[in-house]
Image (spheres, rainbow, N blue to C red):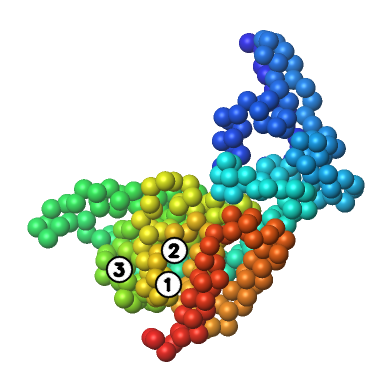
Amino acid sequence: MDRIILLLPAYPVSEIGGEIGRHQRQTRPAEAGGDINSLKEAKGGSMKKGMSINSLMKHMRTNHGMEDLRGSDRKILLRNMGYFHGYKGFRFVRKPKNAIPLPSFDALMDIYGFDSAIKAAIYPEIMFIETAVKNIVLARILENIEDPGLATFLRRGLRTCRDAGGRVVSGQMREKLKLKSQLQNIVRRSYKNDLVKHYVDRDDDAPVWSIFEVMTLGDLTSVCRSLPDETLAEIASDLGFSHANPGIVVDIVETIRPLRNAVAHNGVVFDSRFSQSVKYTNPDRNLAAVGELLDEDLSIGYRLNFNSIVDYIVLLAYLLTLLTHQKKRSREFLRKCLRELEKLESAVGVDTYMMIVGSGDRQKYRFIEGFIDGYGRKR
């Protein structure tokens, strides 16, 4: 059988919330705006050459009204931004059906610039939060077992998976067995890491702390779900959630995890398309629990639904305040983000800004600023 080879423009395709991949799978080439040359339907037919960057610029001027996309400077901007990551990724809000009015290439660059600036502001803070949460969980685990070895933790550090009558709770037992396999897989896949290799080469039990060093937030969620309620309650208190349900630990980790991954892998974040509330129609219980927590602590009067990047900015500032017990870092983070939000609104206009960010952004800022100002007096 003759092979059909699909040639794409030679630009890197970054993560854009999965929308582009689905769009390309579901749309015939001719319907994709001329971005991919049509395949000849006849068996054995060849394919036209992929579009050059000059052809893409002409296509965007002719078919998308970007008359200002001319000259070597803008050619370099488009090349570095990438046609698929840039134009394809930033021409809509959350879903491809929600097209952003882009009257010019400069308008596209305004949104792209906002996305880059917000990621730059979020990156150090969310990495700090990830490290702090991991270490707080680890400290409580080590405090509750007699030695730091993985085998001891698996034997002594997890919930019993039995009810009050001593009967095995099958769902909890499945989670426990899954976690054991997951942690052992971490040791296998991280063998080349010096922290793990040192112990494995000596046939020693890898200590829990060495595994935490190479653990993802998804792995951390699995660990927390298998911890005893008493340990989770201690961790929640250590994190600053002294009045919250112990399950809030998992809720927090699962809420920040998609944002962390999008920022770390240069995904699109300006419209929160990474959020579970955007990806799925059914309510996400983790987001609901965190929204209720913020409503209670910030006295917002309603539950944040995390379909706006402002909701995540509020959450990160809240966590920074709890983890550092200081106000300066949280305030500086909020100021950086607010500055970028104001620049975006000025550049794209109120209607497009509201389409991207949603309503109530200034109100949310006032609530988190009030929480930071009053922190310490309440606790």
- Asked if the residues shown at circle 3 and circle 1 are in contact, with their CB atoms under 8 angstroms apart, the answer is no
Q: Which mark is residue 304?
A: 2
Percent x, y of residue 79: 79, 45
Mark 2 Cα shell of 10 Å, populated few (<14), some (14-19), many (≥20): many
Q: Earlier in the sequence, mark 3 or mark 2?
A: 3
Q: Farthest residue in the right direction?
A: 71
As shown in the figure, which amino acid type bears the numbered disc 2? Leu
Q: Residue 200, relative to residue 231: is it above or below?
A: above
As shown in the figure, which amino acid type bears the numbered disc 1? Ile
Question: Which residue occupies 45% across, 69% down?
Answer: 133
Q: What separation in Å lies between label 3 and label 1 (alpha carbons)?
A: 19 Å
As shown in the figure, which amino acid type bears the numbered disc 3? Asn
Q: Farthest residue in the front direction?
A: 351
Question: Which residue occupies 72% across, 13% down?
Answer: 45
Relative side of 223 to 47, left or right:
left
Question: Which residue occupies 49% across, 50% down?
Answer: 278
Percent x, y of residue 295: 39, 70
Question: Which residue occupies 63% across, 10% down?
Answer: 1
- Asked if the residues shown at circle 1 and circle 2 are in contact, with their CB atoms under 8 angstroms apart, the answer is yes
Q: Nearer the viewer, mark 3 or mark 1?
A: 1
Q: Which mark is residue 300?
A: 1
Question: Residue tagged by mark 3?
Answer: 245
SS assignment at label 2:
loop
Percent x, y of residue 379: 38, 86
Mark 1 Cα shell of 10 Å, populated few (<14), some (14-19), many (≥20): some
- Asked if the residues shown at circle 3 and circle 2 are in contact, with their CB atoms under 8 angstroms apart, the answer is no
Percent x, y of residue 334: 59, 74
Relative side of 58 to 194, left or right:
right
Q: Residue 31, relative to residue 231: is it above or below?
A: above
Is residue 68 visible to the viewer in this orientation of the structure?
A: yes
Q: Residue 165, relative to residue 236: is it above or below?
A: above
Is residue 116 visible to the viewer in this orientation of the structure?
A: no
